Image (spheres, rainbow, N blue to C red):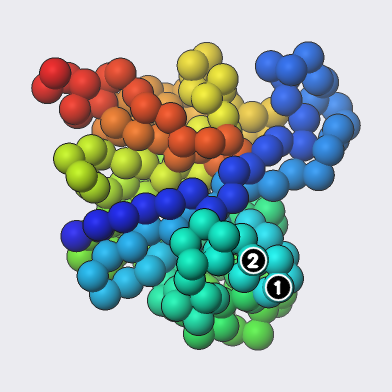
Amino acid sequence: MVHRWDVITVGNLSRNRYWGEGDDAPVRPVLCTCTLVQGADFRLIVDPSVAGPERMAAELDRRTGLDLSDVTHVFLTHEHGDHHAGLACFPEARWMAAPPAADVINASGRYARGVEPVSGRILEAIDATPTPGHTASHHSLRFDCQGLSVVVAGDAVMTRDFWDERRGFFNSVDFTLAAATIERLATLADVVVPGHDNCFLTATGPAGRRG
């Protein structure tokens, strides 16, 4: 069971159409949202966002009081570099991603060891669910915690504005599929942790329908 989850870094986009910015050039450095999910026998980082162990350690400490060595697992939602910028900060952890994403990251030769391909239920508590559109191989994580269904969406949901409009980011490989993925997540999630924004509640997830 998952007994706690925390947002470690709140991400931002390099360019945001909802702020009147165009898609043709970056306006600021990109940062993805990074999340820690904890169970009885695991501490899982999703999309480690901060390069450099000192900075990553500082972010983890200020949000959880934990050390880098306390993290047992890392999951990468997809292969884009901003979502594994801090992967090397966790050399003692088990690195995981969906098989196609793991293949791309491993083929890059960027890391001294490989990312393990995983699918379905991981750590006996979390579902790695396909959420294509941003990339073909994108996977999000869904779990239950304190009576709510939580989806750590990665770039399947860029920000709350993209969620509201059911829209993919400008570099999505398939905009129709991205919209369909958001529609499906709306039936699964009471809480969404997007790829580049803070978490938010939905009104259409399992708890909302029960209410």
Q: Which residue is drawn at 85% across and 27% down?
A: 24
Q: Is residue 134 above or below residue 182?
A: below
Q: Where is residue 118 in the image (x, y as percent from the top left)?
A: 37, 66
Q: In this view, does 201 lie above or below 60?
A: above
Q: What residue type is labelled 1?
A: Glu
Q: In this view, does 130 lie to the left or right of 95?
A: left
Q: What residue type is labelled 2?
A: Ala
Is any atom of residue 210 visible in this view? Answer: yes
Q: Which residue is drawn at 52% across and 57% down?
A: 63
Q: Mark 2 points at which residue?
A: 58
Is any atom of residue 79 visible in this view? Answer: no
How dense is the environment of label 2, judged by Cα within 10 Å: few (below 14), some, or many (20 and up)? some
Q: Residue at x 37, y 58 (%)?
A: 37
Q: Distance between the residues labelled 2 and 1?
A: 6 Å
Q: Where is residue 11 in the image (x, y as percent from the top left)?
A: 63, 43
Q: Mark 1 points at which residue?
A: 54
Res 171 → quadrant: top right
The quarter of the picture where the N terminus appears is bottom left
Q: Are marks 2 and 1 in contact (CB under 8 Å)?
A: yes
Res 161 → quadrant: top right
SS class, disc 1: helix
How dense is the environment of label 1, judged by Cα within 10 Å: few (below 14), some, or many (20 and up)? few
Residue 205, numbered circle: none
Q: Which of 62 and 86 is in front in this view?
A: 62
